[in-house]
Amino acid sequence: MIEDDEIDLRPYVMALLRRWKLIAGLTVVAAAVAAAISLATPASYQATSTVAVAALGAAPVPAIKVYLDLATSDGVLTELSKGVGAASGGATLSPTSLRPMLKATAGSDPSLINLSVVDTDPQRVTSIANGWAGQFVQVAGSDFNPSKDSYDQLQGQLTSVRTELRQAMEQLAGIQSRSQLSLIQSQLAAQMANLTTLYASKAALQNTEDIARSLQNRLQQAPSGAQAQPSDDIAILLIQSSTLGGPTQFQISASSGQQDRPLQVLQMSLAGPQVQIQMPDQANRTVGSQLAALEGIIALIRDRAPDADKQIAARQPSIMELETKVSQIQSEQSGLIAQRDELNAALRALETKASQAKAALDAKSGQPLVITDAQIASPQPRGTTKNVALAAILGLMGGIAVAFGAEYLQSRRRPLKEMAQPVIQS
């Protein structure tokens, strides 16, 4: 058998009835506090100025949102703050203090803007509204609706910038034609390549000398009259060829019947990689003759090393001179290029501003911005009734919550009291 569970609301209703005084008291207190606060709050007044930024019925240039943003911009509020201070005899309001008091909205006509001010002083609110409208008209007229003189001034600035840009371009072209930077850079590259070759040759000579001395040290460990080894002769020939800057491929032949005849280079072609060498009979070659050949090669290397240093030292001044010329030309060109870029940026900015000014003049059609003075400040409703009603609702809800809370705590304490009573046994 299924039984339906039903929620019994009677305990909740009884709890509210038992504590109706608490609920009613909190509701009345909340409403009274709200009424007292509303009555104690100073009355606020609103004044509105209407500004026409274009002919009635016509859409303004630029868009209306741009004008609304301008009305509450820092520049306008800063000047308005100064004007308010001067009008009130020194009591100033900062732009931060003014901003919450001001509100700019689009009017019913697309050409109108409403500038509203809310303040507790009816005279000051009207003064601020009129001052705000005047300052806005002045800034908007300067930025978006320039006079014919301002447009002509922009055209003069454009002419001046174009002249400076043309002069900078002519100077840059003149430097490029006179300096022959590419030719100087080619010469510098050739000099640097030559210097690199000289350093490589010097390093090769040093390496050849190290190899020759290593072979010399090894041969000195053998008796001078010992028979020479063909491999050592070939190594000496290679060292000699490297010292003379010759090729590295050889055609070698041996002659018999020669008594300790030194090695001879029969043919060496600088244009080709081949050398013909006649070698004596190895039976008559000794270690002593090989050491003598190595001494001659080492002496030749020592003679050629200073020449390489002299050639390197002779080329360094010309390289430094070319590097200085290249640096000077590039520095001068960089300055002119930077000036050209700045002038181009300035020219584009002026052309944009002049175009906007021309469009604004055409849209303005000679009509000035129209200002409607702020209306007499009207007091703003305090909203006492709404505040009291809202406070009463909140007080009622709070009273109900407190009543239920009190009932819950009382129900928790009742079992504890029953448990604390003594039990009487019969």
Image (cartoon, rainbow, N blue to C red):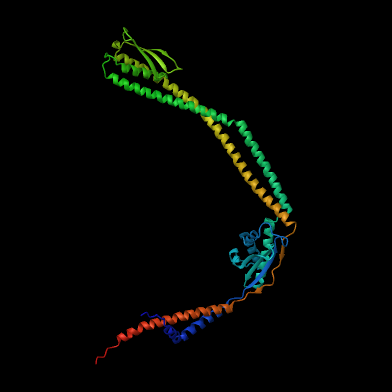
Query: Residue 116: horizontal and vertical position, in percent?
Result: 65, 68
Residue 224 in the figure: left or right of residue 81: left
Q: Is residue 294 visible?
A: no
Q: Residue at horizontal 44%, vertical 21%?
A: 307
Depicted 383 relative to depicted 141: above or below:
below
Q: Quadrant of residue 71?
A: bottom right
Depicted 319 relative to depicted 354: above or below:
above
Query: Residue 352: horizontal and vertical position, in percent?
Result: 66, 49
Q: Residue at horizontal 30%, vertical 21%?
A: 217
Depicted 85 relative to depicted 1: above or below:
above
- Quarter containing the C terminus: bottom left
- Quarter containing the N terminus: bottom left
Q: Quadrant of residue 55?
A: bottom right
Residue 156 in the figure: left or right of residue 285: right
Q: Residue at horizontal 44%, vertical 23%?
A: 308
Query: Residue 178: horizontal and vertical position, in percent?
Result: 62, 31
Q: What is the residue that sits farthest to the top in this orientation?
A: 257
Q: Quadrant of residue 94?
A: bottom right
Q: What is the residue that sits farthest to the front in this orientation?
A: 1
Q: Nearer the viewer, residue 183 or 90?
A: 183
Q: What is the residue that sits farthest to the bottom in this orientation?
A: 426
Residue 42 in the figure: left or right of residue 196: right
Q: Residue at horizontal 37%, vertical 19%?
A: 238
